[in-house]
Image (tube, helix red, strand yellow):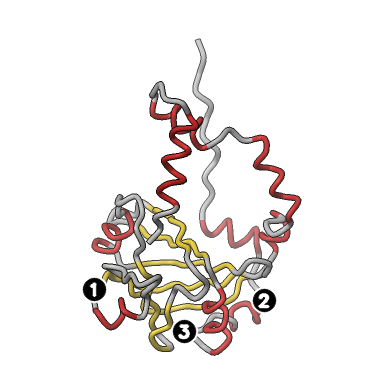
């Protein structure tokens, strides 16, 4: 008879703090509550971010968001807006924000090791003036997410240095992976040529807007 492996030991937040020790004073001081010129400049050059939200029960979700650099707009020094481009229509982030307005963003700029982090509260809007600012290729998004900034700071580049994310040699890792068509066919349990699934996905990519 086999037994399920025991779950790893859970330690308390106090133990974590004791293990890690206190942060440097400069680390605490770097956290700001507004968008300054440096933050604005980073956002204007960022084509990709991740957005974390959670529902009323605390179940978390993190989704990628990407577009042309500067797709996120700085409305003022305390407010950002993200366009909602066509996607899978699952709308987890929208549902979560309706129950729990907490939101966290991580902005990336290709080739830059540091990450910009923004934490605050968010809500969905259809304000025409906001949506018009996000028009791409003559198409305006139907909705946008407004983020009211509570904390903003640059995160050190250790994670990206360790991951070698921007190193072109790292792209070789993809060579050993199954194709997205193969994974989809297996996970959905369908007897379909994986290349047909990949072609369908590529067609969707060509209709980004």
Q: In the picture shown, does residue 178 fall above or below 128?
A: above
Could you tell me which residue is drawn at 76 percent across and 51 percent down?
169
10 Å crowding of disc 3: few (<14), some (14-19), many (20+):
some
Q: Which mark is residue 33?
A: 3
Q: Spot the residue most to the right.
A: 169
**Residue 199 appears at what percent x and percent y?**
46, 39
Of the two numbered discs 2 and 3 on the same chain, state the one appearing first in sequence.
Answer: 2
Q: CA distance from mark 3 to mark 1?
A: 25 Å
Q: Quadrant of residue 27?
A: bottom right
Please give the name of the residue rendered at 24% of the width and 78% of the height, measured from the top-left corner. Answer: 127
Q: Which mark is residue 111?
A: none
Q: Mark 2 or 1 closer to N-term? A: 2
Q: Nearer the viewer, residue 195 or 184?
A: 195
The circle drawn on residue 126 is 1
Q: Residue 45: x percent and y percent?
A: 56, 76
* Badge number at residue 24: 2
Residue 49 location in percent, x, y?
50, 64
């Amino acid at each position: 008879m086999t037994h399920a492996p025991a779950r790893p030991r859970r330690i308390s937040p106090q133990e974590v703090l004791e293990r890690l020790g206190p942060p440097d004073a400069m680390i605490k001081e770097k956290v700001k509550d507004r968008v300054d010129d440096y933050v604005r400049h980073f956002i204007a050059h960022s084509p990709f971010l991740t957005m974390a939200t959670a529902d009323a029960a605390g179940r978390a979700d993190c989704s990628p968001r990407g577009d042309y650099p500067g797709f996120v707009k700085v409305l003022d020094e305390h407010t950002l807006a993200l366009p909602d481009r066509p996607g899978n229509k699952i709308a987890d982030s929208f549902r979560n924000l309706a129950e729990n307005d907490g939101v966290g963003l991580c902005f990336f700029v290709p080739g830059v090791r540091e990450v910009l982090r923004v934490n605050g509260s968010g809500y969905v809007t259809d304000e025409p003036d906001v949506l018009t600012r996000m028009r791409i290729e003559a198409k305006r998004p139907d909705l946008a997410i407004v983020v009211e900034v509570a904390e903003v700071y640059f995160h050190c580049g250790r994670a990206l240095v360790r991951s070698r994310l921007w190193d072109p040699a790292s792209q070789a890792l993809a060579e050993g992976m199954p194709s997205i068509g193969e994974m989809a066919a297996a996970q959905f349990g369908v007897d379909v040529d994986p290349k047909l699934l990949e072609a369908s996905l590529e067609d969707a990519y060509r209709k980004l807007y």
